[in-house]
């Protein structure tokens, strides 16, 4: 018995020694990487306390053994905000691994032209929590972005987030238990299709926000997605813009322009199947003189809408509108438009040919007086957004 205990203690000691060695080996792979190389991540669960960072390299693939086989766990993270960070590169591929429990963002890429996320999972294993990192998969200020067959869970802002980028495809991916499942922000030319989002606060968001380096996005297609049951309570830290997204939001278009939403299944989101709103609805001050706060050129067609006959949420600042101002009871329209219009240049909002279509103009600029359910003003031919073509993508 004594010998068995000694053997067990020796084995535990070897495991404890092996983990720091493995961390050093992984860090060395990143530090010593060169352009036109492959970083092979071995199978196993690795406890890491510092970020893995790759900067200034081209044509690099970082490849694990699979989302369920190569797991980088940052539960004890001491330095760095991200788990994996890639900056100032070209033609980078990330595939077949998971990043867990980072202090900040799970996988962040910045100033990369040609970035692929393929079969990468970002998650916080303790479930939804305001203390989780903000973003799961987080390309920002990138060009030619492909995200496919990925998963994101538990982010306190957005699970899959693309910000201030150009030429983007997000497809065949899943996001659940985040505040925002998928978010496209200040990004130009994005295709978001054949994804599934559920049990987030908001399923899929397209935002244009002020005070950012890239001032305006647009030309986004959202199609053939399943956006269902996004009724999770909002757990974003106070001050984040997504903290104002009402629990029960399927799709939200905030000050977005040239967006086409079609052939999606948008079901069982209890507050709004689709919300089209101006930035004024956030009640945040606008200090950016170049910012345009209105949604324009929105085309919503051939979507399938369903929802249970229940009251919308009354939680959160914007959610309280349903209790004190909108008063729809259990008959909440699927598509809500705030009705705040640029009088000098009214934008076109077209809503046609949706299954179970119901629309409300909230007349927010008129103090929510005279709310209209008449869909006739939205019966128009919308702008068809052209497909995205990517460059500098390694297959």
Image: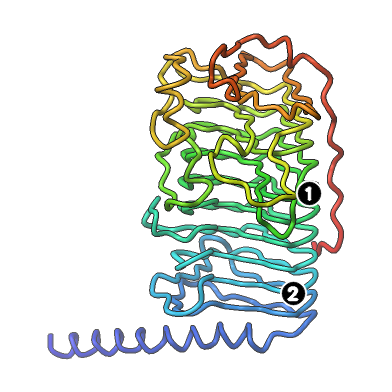
Q: How many marks?
A: 2
From the viewer's perspective, is residue 173 above or below residue 360? below
Q: Earlier in the sequence, mark 1 or mark 2?
A: 2
Image x and y of residue 225, in percent: 65, 35
Against 128, residue 107 (above or below) is: below
Q: Which residue is mark 2?
A: 88
| 90 to the left or right of 332 | right
Can you say whether 302 is above or below 57 in the image? above
Q: Nearer the viewer, residue 298 or 181?
A: 298
Is the Cβ of the residue at disc 1 closer than 8 Å to that at disc 2?
A: no
What distance separates the C-alpha of mark 1 from that of mark 2? Answer: 20 Å
Percent across and percent down for residue 195 are 64, 41
Question: Circle 2 — which element?
Answer: strand
Residue at image point 48% right, 84% down: 22
Is 307 displayed left or right of 264 in the figure?
Answer: left
The residue under the point 65% across, 64% down is 95
Q: Residue 92, percent across and down?
A: 74, 69
- 33 or 371: nearer the viewer: 371
> Residue at point 44% right, 50% down?
236
In this rendering, would 195 be left or right of 61? left
The quadrant in which the C terminus is found is bottom right
- Mark 2 Cα within 10 Å, few/some/many (few <14, many 20+)? some
Which residue lies under the disc numbered 1?
188
* Disc 1, SS: strand
x 68%, y 39%: residue: 293
Q: Please provide percent x and percent y for residue 133.
A: 47, 61
Instruction: Give the crowd class for mark 1: few <14, some 14-19, many >=20 residues within 10 Å.
Output: many
Question: Which residue occupies the extreme left position in the image?
Answer: 1
**Quadrant in which the N terminus is drawn:** bottom left
Residue 379 vertical position relative to residue 201 in the rendered view, above or below: above
């Amino acid at each position: 018995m004594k010998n068995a205990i000694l053997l067990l203690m020796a084995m535990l000691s070897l495991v404890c020694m092996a983990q720091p060695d493995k961390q050093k080996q992984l860090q060395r792979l990143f530090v010593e990487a060169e352009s036109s190389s492959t970083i092979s991540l071995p199978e196993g669960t690795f406890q890491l306390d510092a970020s893995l960072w790759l900067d200034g390299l081209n044509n690099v693939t970082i490849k694990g053994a699979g989302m369920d086989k190569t797991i980088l766990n940052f539960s004890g993270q001491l330095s760095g905000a991200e788990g994996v960070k890639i900056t100032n590169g070209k033609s980078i591929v990330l595939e077949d691994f998971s990043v867990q429990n980072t202090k900040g963002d799970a996988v962040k890429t910045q100033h990369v032209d040609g970035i692929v996320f393929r079969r990468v999972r970002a998650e916080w294993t303790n479930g939804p929590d305001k203390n989780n990192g903000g973003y799961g998969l987080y390309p920002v200020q990138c060009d030619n972005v492909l995200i496919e067959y990925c998963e994101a869970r538990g982010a306190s802002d957005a699970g899959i987030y693309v910000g201030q980028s150009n030429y983007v495809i997000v497809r065949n991916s899943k996001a659940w238990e985040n505040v925002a499942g998928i978010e496209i922000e200040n990004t130009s030319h994005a295709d978001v299709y054949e994804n599934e989002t559920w049990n987030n606060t908001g399923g899929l968001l397209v935002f244009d926000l002020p005070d950012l380096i890239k001032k305006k996005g647009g030309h986004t297609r959202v199609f053939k997605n399943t956006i269902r049951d996004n009724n999770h309570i909002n757990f974003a830290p106070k001050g984040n813009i997504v903290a104002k997204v009402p629990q029960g939001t399927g799709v939200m278009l905030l000050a977005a322009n040239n967006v086409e939403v079609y052939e999606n299944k948008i079901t069982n989101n209890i507050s709004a199947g689709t919300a089209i709103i101006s930035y004024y609805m956030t009640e945040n001050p606008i200090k950016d003189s170049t910012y345009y706060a209105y949604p324009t050129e929105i085309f919503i067609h051939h979507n399938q809408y369903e929802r249970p006959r229940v009251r919308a949420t009354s939680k959160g600042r914007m959610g309280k509108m349903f209790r004190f101002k909108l008063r729809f009871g259990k008959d909440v329209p699927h598509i809500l438009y705030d009705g705040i219009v640029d009088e000098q240049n009214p934008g076109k909002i077209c809503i046609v040919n949706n299954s179970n279509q119901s629309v409300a103009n909230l007349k927010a600029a008129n103090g929510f007086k005279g709310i209209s359910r008449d869909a006739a003003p939205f019966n128009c031919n919308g702008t068809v957004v052209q497909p995205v073509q990517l460059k500098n993508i390694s297959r």
